[in-house]
Amino acid sequence: MGKTSDKNQPDEELISKSQQKREMLALQKLGEQLTTLKPADLAKIPLEESLADAVKLAVRIRNTREGYRRQLQLIGKLMRHADADAIRQAIEQLNSVHQQGNALFHRLEKWRDELISGSDETINQWMADYPLSDRQRLRQFVRQAKKEQQQNKPPKSARELFRYLRELAEASEDK
């Protein structure tokens, strides 16, 4: 009778040792994701100073196998006291921004290829979507890119066309 047992506590508070280990490994995995981020992206994530220092050290010692493994364990331990949900959300937001950038890049590549291989109708479609475009400049880029393709020259004009399309797309997104 002198001992109090855990049987008096509700089932919600009881967490198995296996579940605790899974949670700990998930936090360690999240900490490992932090070590793969660029320094500029890492600065955007809400981290306590000790955790940020541990992540920076892990990045520095990544090539030392055992030291890196132990540092990841330390990061996992520090993550238990950090706001893991806020960190997860910040990483997901960074990933979505990168995915949106990649999607825009692929869309613009497709537009560039269609403009070069297409007709005036393709230019009219672009102008309808992006009215800030300079039709004459656009046609000039397309003409030069077609000429370079026919002569098997490096795609200098195609690159310039892509830069121009990206500028227009970014300008229209800002509005």
Image (cartoon, rainbow, N blue to C red):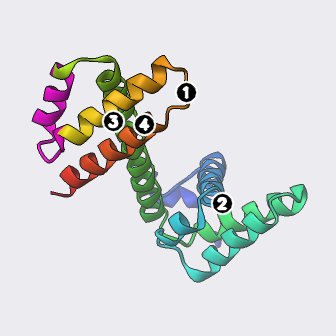
- Cα distance between the residues tagged 4 and 3: 6 Å
Does residue 124 appear left or right of residue 5 in this picture?
left
Q: For this rendering, which residue is in front, 156 or 96?
A: 156
User: Residue 157 shows which numbered tag?
Assistant: 4
Which region is colored magenta? 121-135
Mark sitting on residue 141: 3
Instruction: Tell me the element at label 4.
Output: helix
| Residue, disc 1 | 153
Q: Is residue 127 magenta?
A: yes
Q: CA distance from mark 1 to mark 3?
A: 15 Å
* Secondary structure mostly seen in the magenta stretch: helix
Magenta-colored stretch includes residue 70: no
Residue 13: x %, y % from top left: 48, 58
**Is there any visible trace of residue 26 in the rendered image?**
yes
> For the N terminus, which image quadrant?
bottom right
Q: Earlier in the sequence, mark 1 or mark 3?
A: 3
Given this view, does label 2 or label 3 mark the residue nearer the observer? 3
Task: Report the front residue among 86 and 20.
Answer: 86
Label 2 vs label 1: CA separation? 42 Å
Answer yes or no: do the residues labelled 4 and 3 have beta carbons within 8 Å? yes
> What is the distance, in whole Å, between disc 4 and disc 2 at their CAs?
39 Å
Question: Residue 121 is drawn in which quadrant?
Answer: top left
Question: Seen from this angle, which residue lies furthest bottom?
Answer: 49
Residue labelled with disc 2:
35
